[in-house]
Amino acid sequence: MTIRKQWLIMLILVAIFSVVVNSFVLSSLTEKYFKDYVQDNYDKHFEQIVAYITETLSAENYSKNQMAIQLETHLVDPINRIKVYDAEGLLIADVSSIDTMGKGMMNGNGHGMHGMMMGNYNPGLEEIDNAEIRYGNKVLGQVNITKYSSAENSMDAWLFQSSLMENSIYSISIVLIFVIIIGVLISKKTSKDLIMTANMAQNIDMGNKTIKLRSNVKEIRVIQQSLESLQTRLKIKQKSRKALIDEMIHQTRTPLTIMKTHLEGIEDGIIELTPEEIRICENQIENITNIITNMSSMIDADKELDMTNMEKVNINHLLRQIVSGLKAQYEKKEIDLIIIGNEKINIFTDPYKLSQTIYNILTNAYKYTSSGGRVQIDYQLADDKVIISIEDNGIGISKEDQNKIFEAYYRSDHVLNSDGEGIGLYVAIENMKSINGKLSVSSELNKGSKFILQLPREKDI
């Protein structure tokens, strides 16, 4: 069953229940006050009847027809018959409400629902009250008044109850009409909001474009806002996953380029196949293996992707290993790549992330430095920090671009014609953050750039 049908059925049942309960309470209260009214009215008429008969019989001349006509005016509920006897016990007047009602029906006054239901009326039990008519010490006669045994058996009570029932039916009908109209309008609006919300969820599931919805129903609006939040999180997750994949693809290019350069050099006879060259190729293979391992971990969505493996690293040895891998490539473009200093400095860090950062910076320096240029690497110990600087005399970076180059996929207008996705420096700064380091740049257009890496160093290393 749809929510719309459930809503309509609930409204109709509530409306019927409310009208029935209201009618029952109103009927009970009215009946209580009606009984008191009927009893007071009866006592009043009883006294008036006795007073009238006493006054009439005490007169020497009276008309029986006039008496009957006057007594008929007192045939009101619960009184339905009045008999008057003289002192000798002879009946001198007899009036009944049945005769009066019959005359009324013959005159066409009984019509409508009440007239149709008169035949079903049953007065029930009756009782007789009598009073002796006296004038001083003289007995003039007797009056017998027949009445219904209880107020609810009276004609007026019966007519009132049937009228109340009739009006209750009318009330229920009117209320039901309004309830159905209002219910249809509200349920239509609610159903429309729910259908649109369901379509929104389906579009999110299918990856289609969705529009923002704002229902007037609080609960539906909360669901819509939750779906919007879910869509935002999915987009962020998708974008993050894409960035990670792009990052890993970018990472594989550096070791593959190094291996390709060295193999071409060996093939051309420029580089000799020495144990050192073999170790350079092995290091690049190890880098590719680490990248593939990280990529496979992306299959598990709950697994932490940005894991760090901290260990003791000799900065001089790490830098020379990196330079050895890139030297052939630099020499091919006739760019000098040198390391200043030979001091032994050990730090506790992730060698893979640090190497990747330096590789990315040196790859950019190679790309944006012309032939005959120079790239130098310097490192030194300052207090509890190790500072590595990589400086080139390439095309440089404008002031406005220096605040954006570490953003993913950002490409400056000055380098749009060169290869790359704009993710290398983003990977570099993210790696530095993960190993508690810092990366900054100072540069000037057409004069070169200087990247500074700051790494924490434990005193006992």
Image (cartoon, grey):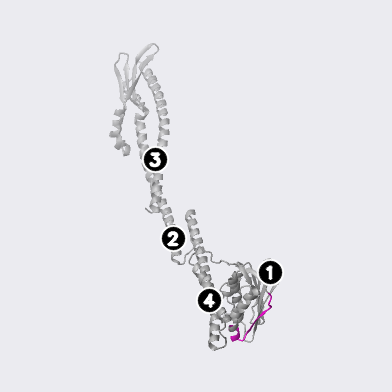
Indicate whether 83 appears above or below 185.
above
Residue type, numbered disc 4: Ile
Provide residue 36's location: percent of width, then percent of height: 42, 28
- For label 3, the residue is 20
Question: Is label 3 or label 2 in front?
Answer: 2
For the magenta stretch, what is the residue range?
329-343
Circles 3, 1 touching at the beta carbon (< 8 Å): no
Q: Residue at 36% across / 16% down in the picture?
A: 133
- Separation of disc 4 and disc 2 at Cα? 53 Å
- For label 4, the residue is 285
- For label 1, the residue is 385
Tell me if mark 1 has few (under 14), some (14-19) or many (20+) residues whose alpha carbon lies within 10 angstroms of its own: some
- Separation of disc 3 and disc 1 at Cα? 86 Å
Q: Earlier in the sequence, mark 3 or mark 4?
A: 3
Q: Quadrant of residue 61?
A: top left
Q: Earlier in the sequence, mark 3 or mark 1?
A: 3
Q: Quadrant of residue 308?
A: bottom right
Q: Earlier in the sequence, mark 3 or mark 2?
A: 3
Indicate whether 285 appears above or below 433.
below
- Separation of disc 2 and disc 1 at Cα? 58 Å
- Number of marks in picture: 4
Question: Is label 3 or label 4 in front?
Answer: 4
- Separation of disc 1 and disc 4 at Cα? 31 Å
Residue 50 seen in the current view: yes
Q: On the rendered structure, is 117 left or right of 305?
A: left
Q: Secondary structure at mark 3?
A: helix
Q: Residue at 36% across / 13% down in the picture?
A: 139
Residue type, numbered disc 1: Lys
Tell me if mark 2 has few (under 14), some (14-19) or many (20+) residues whose alpha carbon lies within 10 angstroms of its own: some
Q: Tell me if residue 330 is in the magenta stretch.
A: yes
